[in-house]
Image (cartoon, coloured by chain):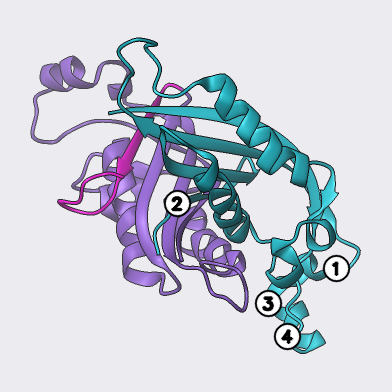
Amino acid sequence: MKAHLSRRYLFSASHRLHSEHMSADENRATYGKCNNPHGHGHNYRLEVTVSGPVDQSTGMVCNLVDLDGFVEREVLSRYDLENLNTLREFVNNVPTTENLCVEIFEILQRGFPHAHLEKVRLEETMMNSFEYSGSGKPRK
Amino acid sequence: MVYLTRKAEFSASHYYHNPSFTAEENRRIFGKCNNPNGHGHNYTLEVTVKGEVDARSGFVVDLKQLKEIMTREVLDAMDHRFLNKEVPEFLTQIPTTENLAIAIWQRLVPRLEKAQLHRVRVYETPDLFVDFYGEP
């Protein structure tokens, strides 16, 4: 039988929202305080949901050791305690939580072989969160 | 269609072990969870049902009835129990959170009358949960 497994992780990072395609005034108008040139930080809560048949011999969708290991190695160690604007993927891409959510989804999609990736959900603060399930797929 | 979710909490112990694996395989696959003396969690259960809102009562489901079913079928059977030894499903299955969500779904489905079960969500910890939608 098919089940969905979700795991939550925590990382902290700084960013500045600023687009090269906008004037200084437009940047300020669009991003407000988030456009502060010195940047600011968040404690991000990441929620990864995978799905698949429950293996009868283990009772698991996938071994948590594999999921935790992958997320630690490929996501948390990349983003935790970093300035997102300094990373390659955000040189030409504003590090909004939308874009970060999509990046993390794609890292998992490319490299995690042990279960089907359903969704990445990213909380920037307790008040706002973002979800991505891949292009064109409706949310469950 | 309106969805209604009711939460409940229960505490139970369990351990992971497959008798067809060797001792070494059990330790490798299940790690600390293989300790035969068991360990415990405070589980949070979320049961979501769906249905049309009844024109007379304004309810999707009688919440009191849903609460009673959850108490009888899940909490009375699992709260403050050692799942491997005291819950019939887990005499033969490993009481992972996945199997727990499936077992709870199977216990609830035959008891619900008007409302249709949509999702069973079981939190093993605040950072780990399983959703089961009754999919084969």
The amino acid type, in three-letter code, at marker 1 is Asn
On whether residue A10 falls in the magenta region, the answer is no
Residue range (magenta) = A127-140
Q: Mark 3 points at which residue?
A: B29
Q: Mark 1 points at which residue?
A: B35
Q: Mark 4 points at which residue?
A: B25
Which chain is cyan in the rendering?
B
Are the residues flagged by discs 3 and 4 in contact, CB closer than 8 Å? yes
Name above or below for residue B48 compared with residue B61: below
Name above or below for residue B62 compared with residue B107: above
- In the picture, which quadrant includes the C terminus of chain A? top left
The amino acid type, in three-letter code, at marker 2 is Val
Pick out the residue farthest to the right.
B37
- Which tint was used for chain A? purple
The Cα–Cα distance between marks 4 and 2, rounded to whole angstroms, is 27 Å
Q: Mark 2 points at which residue?
A: A48
Can residue B90 be spotted in the picture?
yes
- Depth check: B52 or A72 in front? B52
Crowd around label 4: few <14 · some 14–19 · many ≥20 (10 Å) = few
